[in-house]
Image (tube, grey):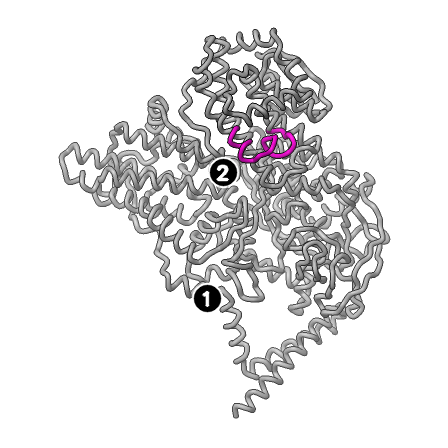
Amino acid sequence: MKLHLSEGSPAGLKGLAAANATESPVELQWVSLEAHVVPFLTHPQSTVLQLEDGTFLFSTNTICQYFFRLSGKEMSDFGQEQSGFTNQLFEWEATELEPALSAALYLLLVQGKKGEEILGIIKKPLNYIEQILTKKSTPYLTGETESAADIVLWGSLFPLLKDESYLPDELQALRKWFQTMSLKEYCKKAVEAIWTPKGLLALKAYLQKHPAPNLTFEKPATNEPKEEDSAQRHLSEEEIAVIAEVWSRGSASLPKPWKPQHPILPVEGMKNVLITSALPYVNNVPHLGNIIGCVLSADTFARYCRLRNWNTLYLCGTDEYGTATETKAMEEGLTPQQICDKYYAVHDQIYKWFNISFDFFGRTTTTQQTTIAQDIFHCLLKRNFLLTETVDQLKCEKCERFLADRFVEGTCPFCNYEEARGDQCDKCGKLINATELKKPVCKVCQGTPVVRSSQHLFLDLPKLEESLEKWLALSQSTGDWTPNARYIARSWIRDGLKPRCITRDLKWGTPVPLDGFRDKVFYVWFDAPIGYLSIAANYTDQWEKWWKNPEQVQLYNFMAKDNVPFHSVVFPCTLLGTGDKYTLVNHLIATEYLNYEDGKFSKSRGVGVFGDMAKDTGIPSDIWRFYLLYLRPESQDSAFSWTDLMTKNNSELLNTLGNFINRAGSFVCKFFGGHVPAMELNQDDKRLLAHITLELRQYNYLLEKVKIREALRSILNMARHGNHYLQVNEPWKHIKGSEADKKRAGTVIGVAVNIASLLSVVLQPYMPNVSATIQQQLSIPADYNVVSNDFVCTLPAGHQIGTVTPLFQKLEAEQIENLRKRFGGGQQKAAANCDATLGSKTLQEEVAKQDNYVQQLKAQKAEKQQIDAAVSKLGELQKQLSLAGGQEKKKK
């Protein structure tokens, strides 16, 4: 690695101190402050890290993070909350502290100012750092030991605070922290190399050649650096004038929507975005938590990417191999393939109803899956990344089979949760081996299994750990990983990687193509992520242009947090081990869990709303989408609440969003015959345009960072601005006044309906049906479905709109209470009552049908376990028939 530095560069102080602190093996390259080190940047950038593969890191904060993560020091000892705060500090430093310090440094070095003029600019940021250190009562910003955040803030502050007259006496915690950092050997060496007399002269000359930074800093340092503050900042008259001028350019200034060819393939020179959501198990009907955790979140982001004209491919499919499918097949007396076919259709119908815009929704039971998985296996075998070990497994002697993970349940050895699975505990999230379970039980026959030995293949994760560390450091430094994903990945590495078994003693799965193991299949967590590749291969035979193209493709993975270890460690190690240039995840987006009211979703107990039930509630799919995204568990668990759903629908949608759009359109129809009136903007109108523009830019910023829930607030804020604008200006009164009053009413209504037009576009990722309805009502051309950073007039004077009708309906308390009862276990009780009243005639038909099925299985010489399951079901039906017959005799 080469670290390019300049004498006199404040950014260089941070980069060199971080390299020294982490003992990173870098070769120093000294350049001038005017150097263009990065060939594709138009402005000088002298502090640059050039990686061995030619990649350039030119954000100093990113460089510092990279050094710390590469060394394993960053976030190895911190929890998820601390790592999230570290990221907040980086963002605050870049957006608030650095601009203030740049202005102060310009005053000091170029204009020769001193004292209060400089202190006045930096005092508020200094107070904020003092608050952090005082509140935490720790010697460093994020804890008991220094982190990358300490070096970044120290490096920014040093050029001024080395003169202690700029360190107010009352800021004792800050003074102590700064002095402690300045005495660190790695900081002292950085100062000696960077902050030289020659360097100071070079910095002064550099500053004199460039425009003075903004010297007015009205924005106070906040207690917590939050992104939404930027949408509320003070606007200068110059900014307002520029925004109004851009607005006046109209729709001609919008880029034309990108229309990709099919199949969609990466395009050189474009931003190519590949999106996957965790493959849902085929045997489960997804509940609302499953839907928001992967497919709906990914769909929202995919729709946004398309609005930005990014070349986007969104893939998903059902995960169909493994023990879960075998278990379900046994329960229903079907073959595994029949189960897969049955539930694939269920999933497909649910996602279509929720309007999930997959470019392709596939499945893993395909020849492409077998071919690609076995090819990857052979590469790992050839490159000596596989081990053979004898494994103790649980075997049910009654069922005469080794029990795979999903066939075993018991007490978790870590947290004592009594319903832990044989591969992972749902309560504490730890991965476990089935033999570690306390009080294990066979889920098939409820018997107690015994421990027996079997030979298996393992992926040698320790051998791949160094490669994983390098990739992970780069991916987390340059990509958007959610704090929980960062923490979980780092905790795995901190605890030390261990060889991971990749085979299972099952029949239903991808066969292992190796002598001695041909009676086994690949373990689902080795096999399932390869499904992303095979689903792409089913979509196009040019799939490698997406999956072996890391230079041109940005990969986003969406999932719930329990899937993070496999996507951040196991699957990347699998692909790294092949030696091929696979596209690895750049942005890993993991949610926490969505709970149901005060508990968990449970299909067996009839608790919670599942995907196949949502459409039977009478509530449109877009309302479900809105509410799930509104409470998306981005940083902590959240809970679905019927009362809250009613509240959000009636307040945010009906009263705020729907009310504004309906009023804006209705006024055009009522007062101007359906034609958008002429608009003559005054300063208040232009100021409104500026506020809407800031909200639009905030919306873009948040969605680029995949902060989906927060971006939804920006949409609602636009509607609130619009409602307030109408209330203050009262166009329904002005329309009855003088000609000047009528013109004013026309301007207000014209601006309002244009805000409604913008809302129809930014709402599309969240509520596509509502978006389409608004666009139909306002007669908005399809070419306007593109998002930029500018709010422009898309509905000019004279544009004719269509018929405007209300977008949303009120949810009534009685309706909601009935639904709460129905989905609080009520449907299970109803089903039980229905079963109890089944007559003997119906049961006789079921017994005859099942008996016929058993005979077919025997004639086909099906596997013993499948026949046994079908016979067991037949026996249960016969018992029910006997009981029903007895009850009917009693009635007679």
Check disc 2 and report the residue beneath it: 703
Residues drawn in magenta: 130-149
Instruction: State which quadrant residue 778 falls in.
Output: top left
Check disc 1 and report the residue beneath it: 821
Q: Residue at x 36, y 53 (%)?
A: 650
Q: Residue at x 59, y 38 (%)?
A: 82
Instruction: State which quadrant residue 340 falls in.
Output: bottom right
What label sits on residue 349 in the rendered view? none
Q: Is residue 452 above or below residue 681?
A: below
Distance from the alpha carbon under mark 2 to that under mark 1: 36 Å
Instruction: Report x, y in % for residue 69.
Output: 67, 32
Q: Amino acid at mark 2?
A: Leu
**809 sits left or right of 703 in the view:** left
**Neighbourhood count class around disc 2 (C-alpha, 10 Å): few under 14, some 14–19, many 20 upward:** some
Instruction: Report x, y in % for residue 796.
Output: 30, 34
- Compare marks 2 and 1 and give the one earlier in the sequence: 2
Instruction: State which quadrant residue 732 falls in.
Output: top left
Q: Amino acid at mark 1?
A: Lys
Q: Is residue 108 above or below residue 375?
A: above
Regarding mark 2 in the picture, which secondary structure is present there? Answer: helix
Q: Residue at x 27, y 27 (%)?
A: 683
Q: Residue at x 78, y 40 (%)?
A: 462
**632 sits left or right of 543 in the view:** left
